[in-house]
Image (spheres, rainbow, N blue to C red):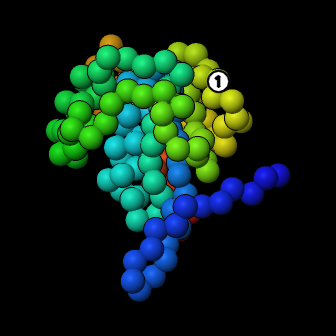
Amino acid sequence: MEEKVLECLSTTSEQRCYKKIAFICVHNSCRSQIAEALGKYLAADVFESYSAGTETKPQINQDAVRIMKDLYGIDMEKTQYSKLVSDIPSPDIAISMGCNVGCPYIGIAFDDNWGLEDPTGKSDDEFKRIIKEIENHILQLREELK
C-alpha cells in the first residue's frame, strides 16, 4: 500500500501533521457540508476537514444552513460552497456520507461509509437527528486520530 505523506504545519515551537479528511456525497450540498463544518468546529486540532461531491449544487441546502446556525452558531455559507472532488486536496481519509442518493465515484476506495440518510426535504427533527449522528462520527474520528 502506498504511504501518503502528510502535509505538516509548523510553528516556532512544534511541528504538527494533520490528516486531510474528505467527506463525500454526490451533490456536496447537505450531509458532507455539515460534516466539513462540524469537523472544523470540533476537530480542527486533530485533522483538516474538506467536503466535495461528484456533482455540485448552486447553494448549500438552506435547511442545513439554518439548523447549523441555530445549533452551533456556524454559518456554513460564509466559508463553504458546493465543490467537486477535484477541487479539494487529495485526502488521507475519504468518507462517504451514504449511498441512498447514489454512491459517488471518486477514483479511490472509501475508507469508511457512514451510511447516513439524506435529510433533504424532511423535517427539522430529522435534520437534527442526522446532524447529531454526524457530530458523533466526527467526535469518534477525532478520538481515533488523536
Residue 132 appears in view: no
- Residue 122 at x, y percent in the picture: 33, 16
Looking at the image, which residue is at 60% across and 22% down?
Answer: 104
Q: Report whether 138 appears left or right of 70.
A: right
Which residue is at the far right? 1
- Residue 63 at x, y percent in the picture: 25, 23
Looking at the image, which residue is at 79% across and 52% down?
Answer: 2
Looking at the image, which residue is at 61% across and 21% down?
Answer: 103
Q: Residues within 10 Å of mark 1 (few under 14, many from 20)?
A: some
Amino acid type of the residue that numbered disc 1 sits on in the rendered structure = Tyr
Q: Nearer the viewer, residue 129 or 98?
A: 98
Q: Quadrant of residue 32?
A: top left
Q: Quadrant of residue 107?
A: top right
Tell me the element at label 1.
Answer: loop
Check the image and report above or below for 28 versus 132.
above
Check the image and report above or below for 144 versus 96.
below
Q: Report whether 16 appears left or right of 73.
A: right
Check the image and report above or below for 124 versus 68.
above
Query: How many discs appear?
Result: 1
Q: Report whether 118 appears left or right of 103.
A: left
Looking at the image, which residue is at 49% across and 39% down?
Answer: 88
Q: Which residue is mark 1?
A: 105
- Residue 92 at x, y percent in the picture: 61, 50
- Residue 93 at x, y percent in the picture: 61, 47
Residue 106 appears in view: yes
